Image (cartoon, rainbow, N blue to C red):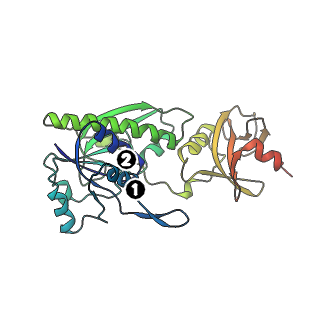
């Protein structure tokens, strides 16, 4: 069975590595064009490209598939299956029609919940207790294809979106390998998604960062977790702006107005919410470095 793999970031590389280790024949890899990165703005290859080159697999990096030449290039690889994991491009019908067995995708949610570009982040932001990955057939409509299989995992109440993604990458890699194994055995049936249960996970942006203390402690805590590692929750305190990297939920004080500083402990700064309170344990002042809140406020006393 001839497999073409399409993907770009670390989660994609984890999946590619797994299917190669499990012996699947990957005849070509598609990934996003090299992009400028870091201060030097040096063109940098994606994690998937680096892995493919290391394994001696041909790499293709079209800007898109609008040209017939790009589609013909894929056809020449004669794929039975195209496996897509966080590729970063919407595939046109001309591409979906190329593989004889179809295009499949690993999506980082339990569909039909959280269709879209930020599924695992929104699962954390919404305080979900579990999530997972879904293997599905690709269609022209985003994340709407028939589902093949799922793998479920609990979300730890202290886990950040970044930490969750690391686990979903491993879970997704196993599910992709399992799914390709089914394709190698014969036809693979899909199950239609229940459109009445669809929710969406739009791209995150920095407008979501400021913390409102009118939220409950749980909502603030989930905001901090869900926006880590990007774009990071922020707060204003004493006229200064801080990025907030880690919080824990603590008991509030009766009658305390949301946003009131309740005290500085050995582990963090406690602030009242509309219900309960959070203790900010790791933060970063604007222009400063990330550090423990007690360490910061020992050098910058509140009210000082």
Q: Residue 292: image x %, image y %?
A: 71, 43
Q: Is residue 46 visible?
A: yes
User: In the rendered structure, are the residues bearing label 1 and label 2 in contact, judged by CB atoms less than 8 Å apart?
Assistant: yes
Please tell me whether mark 2 sits on a helix, a strand or a loop. Answer: helix
**Residue lying at 16% horizontally and 63% vertically, measured from the top left:** 72
Q: Residues within 10 Å of mark 1 (few under 14, many from 20)?
A: many
For residue 13, which numbered disc appears in the image?
2
**Residue lying at 35% horizontally and 39% vertically, measured from the top left:** 172
Image position of 186 (left or right of 26): left
Q: Residue 262: image x %, image y %?
A: 78, 39
Image position of 84 (left or right of 167): left
Please tell me whether mark 1 sits on a helix, a strand or a loop. Answer: loop
**Residue lying at 31% horizontally and 41% vertically, measured from the top left:** 196
For residue 46, which numbered disc appears in the image?
1
- Residue in front for this viewpoint, 189 or 36: 36
Q: Quadrant of the N terminus?
A: top left
Q: CA distance from mark 1 to mark 2?
A: 9 Å
Q: Residues within 10 Å of mark 2 (few under 14, many from 20)?
A: many
Image position of 14 (left or right of 73): right
Q: Residue 65: image x %, image y %?
A: 25, 64
Task: Give the answer, above or below, for where 265 lies relative to 5.
Answer: above
Task: Give the answer, above or below, for where 160 lies relative to 286.
Answer: above
């Amino acid at each position: 069975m001839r497999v073409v793999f399409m993907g770009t970031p670390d989660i994609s590389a984890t999946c590619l590595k797994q299917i190669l280790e499990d012996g699947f024949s990957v005849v070509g890899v598609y990934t996003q064009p090299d992009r400028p990165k870091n201060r030097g703005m040096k063109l940098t290859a994606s994690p998937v490209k680096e892995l493919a080159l290391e394994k001696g697999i041909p790499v293709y990096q079209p800007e898109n598939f609008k040209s017939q030449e790009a589609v013909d290039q894929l056809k020449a690889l004669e794929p039975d299956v195209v496996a897509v994991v966080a590729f970063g491009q919407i595939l046109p019908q001309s591409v979906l029609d190329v593989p004889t067995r179809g295009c499949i995708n690993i999506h980082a949610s339990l569909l039909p919940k959280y269709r879209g570009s930020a599924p695992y982040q929104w699962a954390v932001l919404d305080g979900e207790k579990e999530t997972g990955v879904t293997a599905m057939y690709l269609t022209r409509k985003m994340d709407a294809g028939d589902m093949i299989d799922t793998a479920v995992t609990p979300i730890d109440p202290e886990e950040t979106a970044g930490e969750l993604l690391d686990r979903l990458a491993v879970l997704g890699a196993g599910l992709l390998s399992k799914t390709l194994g089914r394709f190698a055995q014969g036809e693979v049936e899909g199950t239609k998604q229940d459109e009445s249960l669809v929710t969406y996970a739009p791209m995150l942006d920095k407008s979501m960062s400021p913390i409102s203390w009118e939220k409950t402690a749980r909502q603030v805590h989930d905001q901090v977790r869900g926006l880590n590692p990007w774009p990071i929750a922020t707060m204003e305190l004493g006229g200064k702006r801080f990025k907030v990297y880690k919080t824990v939920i603590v008991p509030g004080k009766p009658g305390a107005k949301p946003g009131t500083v309740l005290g500085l402990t050995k582990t963090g700064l406690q602030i009242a919410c509309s219900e309960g309170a959070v203790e900010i344990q790791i933060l970063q002042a604007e222009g400063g470095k990330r550090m423990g809140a007690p360490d910061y406020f020992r050098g910058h006393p509140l009210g000082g």
